[in-house]
Amino acid sequence: MKQNLNRRDFLKLAGLAPLGLIAPPLVKKLSEYNPLQGERKNALVILFDSFSASDINLYGYERETTPNLSRLAKRAVVYHNHYAGGNYTTPGTASLLTMAHPWSHRAFRFGARVTDEYANKSVFHAFDDYHRVGYTHNPLANTLLMQFQMDMDQYVPMEKLFISDDGLIRELFSKDEDIATVSWTREIKRSEYGYSYSLLLSHLYEKYKDLQLASYKSAYPNGLPNTNGGNYYVLEEGIDWLRDQIAEFPQPFFAYIHYHPPHFPYKPRIEFNDTFTRDSYKPPAKPDDLFTEDNSYDTLANARARYDEFILNVDSEFGRLFDTLESSGMLENTWVALTSDHGEMQERGISGHVTPTLYQPIVRVPLMIFEPGKATGSEVHEPTSAVDLMTTLLYLTGHEIPEWSEGNILPPYADGAPKRSNLVYTVQARRNNVELPLTEATISQVVDNFKLIYYIGYPELEGLGEKIQLFDIQSDPEEMNDLSVAKRETASELLDLLKIKLNEVNRPYQSG
Ligand SMILES: [Zn+2]
């Protein structure tokens, strides 16, 4: 491609224009697009972590994992091709909350925060005239919420909904929280790292914790859900807490509630155990990937059955929450969105979501939007992005769309609004230095029915330096057939587009 061609000229030459790959010209900036007037409704975002669209019955999965979502879909806008911003909690959540891609907010390393520049570019900042609430079970997401805390009216500490951790001690010593928490940390918590100051107290605590956990044993015979093997929680209590609190939130409110299930470890309540482990469903066999973790087909199939049972539990609790909100009248003036930060995969020898690959089970997540007081729904099949959700909620509640948002207003609400891009990206760059250009990364780029996956800089590529895959996700949703050779021209056109983008986002980090 010649340097003096601009992008539109290039695309015309490349023959991509008829495919509809070019965004319509930006008549005016989205940030100047007039917000709706007089629509100060509440906005509630419910996120279930690691919730893959690939395992959701409503999205075509064979197992009946989501009877409640299917029931509620009739009154929601259901997005069938919605993509996470990243492949695990840190980049995925940061993209949701900042409305920017990981290459902009830079929270792509494990446990990272967004850059200082983005610390006040969150959705909480943009909802500045609302009562803003944030909660998460997930420590990685909590790191981000703490960073955005200055723009929240009600930051709820993560431990609030843990069964046994520091939150317990806050309850026990509610009149003396500071001292209790400090001494607790000094005396007990550090014992996890090998040094406790008080043997007596730590023994008492262990007993107390065991007793507490034992009371859940009958409902959770396979163990309690937890984060990091220590922070035990049950989703039902998290749902009950929200049900009780939400009536107390000053209105209008914006609330972001990020629950941990169906994240690993998959620990559903007793009534969901063994629903799928012995059914007749056989996940499609797929070849091992370059980044395989060497898990066998049976290991992965079993993990997937457990994961699906945890989804059934999530679906049941979401249904319960929704019904409660409805009977309380809250849905009459509240936008409700259900989504996830990224997906989960059990195939190609890979289990989980921390992998350089960006197959559909990892990047495609649910999105359902419930409009206040509306009983009918619709379906959206065009590809949409995590960066679009908060952008849209701001627009729908009469807020200006911040200039830093990289998202579009989602259909069916866009109503002629200019579109920033037709290209939907997911970025994985877990080992890349945040202060340097992306040189070890995977980027998935979806447009229409095509998905290009671009890998650069991994040692596994063995001197090739880069690799691409191209899938027609409409006719081949399981990504069995890599078209990068058979459709070489399309692949190289899409790769050129991606490289233009990559050069643009890398430029600020290039030295000299
Ligand atoms: Zn996550």
Image: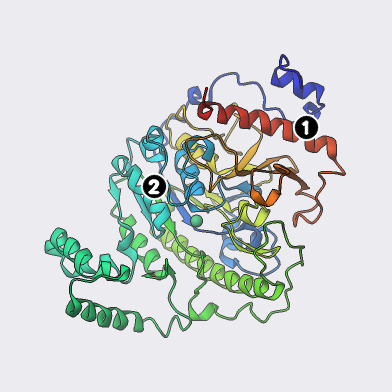
From this view, report whether residue 46 is shown above or below residue 456. below
Q: Residue furthest right?
A: 486
Q: Which residue is rendered at x = 73% and y = 35% of the image?
A: 495
Q: Is residue 170 visible?
A: no
Cβ of disc 2 within 8 Å of ligand 1?
A: no
Mark 2 or 1, nearer chain start = 2
Tag of residue 228 = none
Give the image location of residue 233, x and y in percent.
38, 69
Callout 2 amino acid: Leu
Give the image location of residue 122, x and y in percent.
40, 38
Horizontal placement of 495 versus 88: left or right?
right
Q: Which residue is rendered at x = 26% and y = 65% of the image?
A: 166
Count how many numbered circles sit on residues in the image: 2
Q: Quadrant of the N terminus?
A: top right
Give the image location of residue 268, x and y in percent.
50, 74
Callout 1 amino acid: Glu
Q: Pick whichever, 341 or 488, lies toward us.
A: 488
List the residue tagged with mark 1: 493
Q: Which residue is rendered at x = 40% and y = 50% of the image?
A: 256
Q: How many residues crowd mark 2 within 10 Å: few (<14), some (14–19), many (20+)?
A: many
List the residue tagged with mark 2: 144
Q: How many residues crowd mark 1 within 10 Å: few (<14), some (14–19), many (20+)?
A: some
From this view, report whether residue 280 is shown above or below residue 330. below
Secondary structure beneath disc 2? helix
Q: Which residue is rendered at x = 66% and y = 33% of the image?
A: 422
Mark 2 and mark 1: span between their CA atoms? 36 Å
Q: Pick whichever, 73 or 7, lies toward us.
A: 7
